[in-house]
Image (cartoon, grey):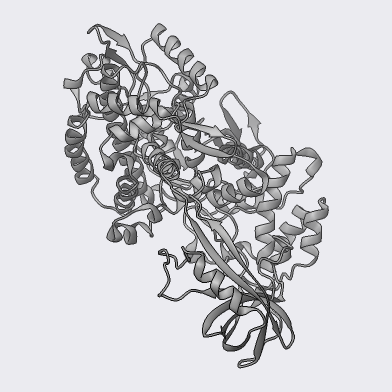
Amino acid sequence: MRLIIAEKPSLARAIAEALPASAQRRDGYIEAGDTIVSWCVGHLLEQAPPDAYDAAFKTWRRDHLPIVPQQWKLTPRPKARSQLGVLRGLIKRAASVVHAGDPDREGQLLVQEVIEHLGWKGAIARLLISDLNRPAVVRALSRIEDNTHYLPLYRAAETRARADWLYGINLTRAWTLIGRQAGHDGVLSIGRVQTPVLGLVVRRDEEIRDFTPYPFFVLWAQLAVASGQLRAWWVPGEGHRLDERGRLLDRQPADTLTERLQGAQGQLTNLDRRQRRQPPPLPYSLSALQVDAARRHGLSAKAVLDICQRLYERHQLITYPRSDCRYLPREHLKGMPQQLASACARDDVLSSWLANADMSLRSRAWDDTRVGAHHALSPTGKPFDPTRLTRQEADVYRLITRNVLAQFYPPLETCEVKAEFIILDERFRASGQEIIAPGWKPLFTTREETPPLPSLRQGESCRVLATEVEEKQTRPPEHFTDASLIKAMMNIARYVEDSEVRRTLRDTDGLGTEATRANIIETLIERCYLVRDGKSLRATQLGVALIQSVPPAVGRPERTALWEQRLEAIANQDNPAPFLDALVNDLHQLVAAADSQRLAQALSEARQHQAIPDATPRQRRRSTTSRRSSKAGNSSRTSSGTGSRKSRSGASSSAPRRRRRTTEES
């Protein structure tokens, strides 16, 4: 008997339906001839809690830290014991085993750790599926590989899980203990991803809070030229008081010049025309989709992730959604016209876009060299009926399909014009854009972002018709939203001060992964570190105090982004031991840096500062409920390390329990 173990039930069903034999549903598996397809339900196993290594670790004590297991242990998740039992019985009967986890680092870990935990000693095959559509699954079944090729990926995922455990358990315990001394009744969780993300928000809020606006002045002139009129802006010279962006800080020079400009003559001294061809935007990765869906439809990152999972699993309308890739395999190109015809047939908007598509075009999106474990999000070709989806599901589906349709549209062709005039020995500049061929642009917007200039000729004269001096105010940066925070996590190098590290980080995937970024935001909200203020995300008093109390490196992105580089090297067959050894050495220093007085001062200052919001009543109620329920039952099964801790009186008490998350979300 051949046993195929899928990552989730929906994938198992898709595999069983693609097998030649008819499928029969059983308790915990599907039987199709001599093949049995079973499944995991997310992680069936998790890193064992500290007290599994030593019962003394059930009590949270500073002198235990850092806790470093010598022989790592996994433990079944309580709700997964039944399915794990099914797999144990099946694997004893199996003649061969096929690993069918998702084609990424976490998918490799999730299934392989179960196979090893259940004691399978034989060879393991690897089935890679990123599209639940039947033809795609049939193709994948014909290309089963040897799982040994993916052992380095498994070691990288295993190392990531252990490193997250070490980092989260030890720092969470250290800061929770000093939090008790500082008067905070609750767990202060710290993680290698969530804490730097919180740091981004805290620093942005501080920048806004400390921002002092100042006025600056712009002078524009309405000019008459041979073919019409245009508006040009004065470029003040270095003899005036300017800020770092060249903005005029004194009004008097502008007022003086505007009095002289009435009816003045000038000349066009520099004319720059450049034609540009802009290819269509690439198909979406999950994070890119989350950014656009937040901007266009006001959806949170978590809502977009949940919608995509339903479109993938329940409706089977899109390919694997948790992808970090924006390119498509060339082999998909042949069948794409038929897939898009089916996908768009029942929707007026999509049908109108499809009608104008040219299926003979080939965009840069079709590039096998840029496709890794996953490819970009794409419609499967299953007919899309908007009446059977929620409005939000239909909106997200149209975005995904639109970006694939755009690959069959010609480039956007524009002519960008920059003109410089000299009037009374002063420079004035004007710019405009003319759309020569709209190409893919109508699928995204019909608005012209920059109006075109009238036809201009080098050296022609101009005359001033009107002028005005406008007073403007400098503006602080905007608070983070779901869209801008996801984008910041994707492009984390922009927030790094060290130029060498910044160059290095441009090649990494940023903070978190496609699968975890939305949950990181929601986790920070649940833990009362962030609060939603309309569409904005703001750090709470607790979030601000935590960032101010941890060592700077813990709250900044450099560490976790560089971790990803090390893990990538392990995935390319590097030895994981030096990475974990260096982390343990680092943890000794970080734990020693936990200072209750510094945390108490940070909490006090945050509470006194009226500009910093507190957690919402709902967040506080949830936190209080969580603390009460945890005191009824001692637990330490979390990625950041919960369990017992000493109360201020010195007695052992249970640490507040929080909802379990994967270690990568910590």
Q: Residue 224's spot in the image, x, y percent?
A: 71, 82
Relative placement, left or right, of 412 versus 96 is: right
Instruction: Inspect this view and state whether residue 640 appears.
Output: no
Above or below for 135 versus 597: below
Residue visible at 62% across and 42% down? 308
In this view, 398 is above or below 371: above
State whether residue 441 is above or below residue 565: below
Q: Identify the residue at horizontal 46%, vertical 26% (top origin).
A: 614
Q: Is residue 241 left or right of residue 5?
A: left
Q: Nearer the viewer, residue 486 or 452?
A: 452
Q: Give the image location of residue 507, x and y in percent.
A: 38, 59
* Point 74% across, 86% down: residue: 227
Give x and y (percent) for residue 41: 51, 30
Asked where in the image residue 413 lies, by quadrant, the reply is bottom right
Q: Quadrant of the C terminus?
A: top left
277 or 642, nearer to the observer: 277
Q: Does residue 602 appear in this view?
A: yes
Name which quarter of the figure residue 357 lies in. bottom right
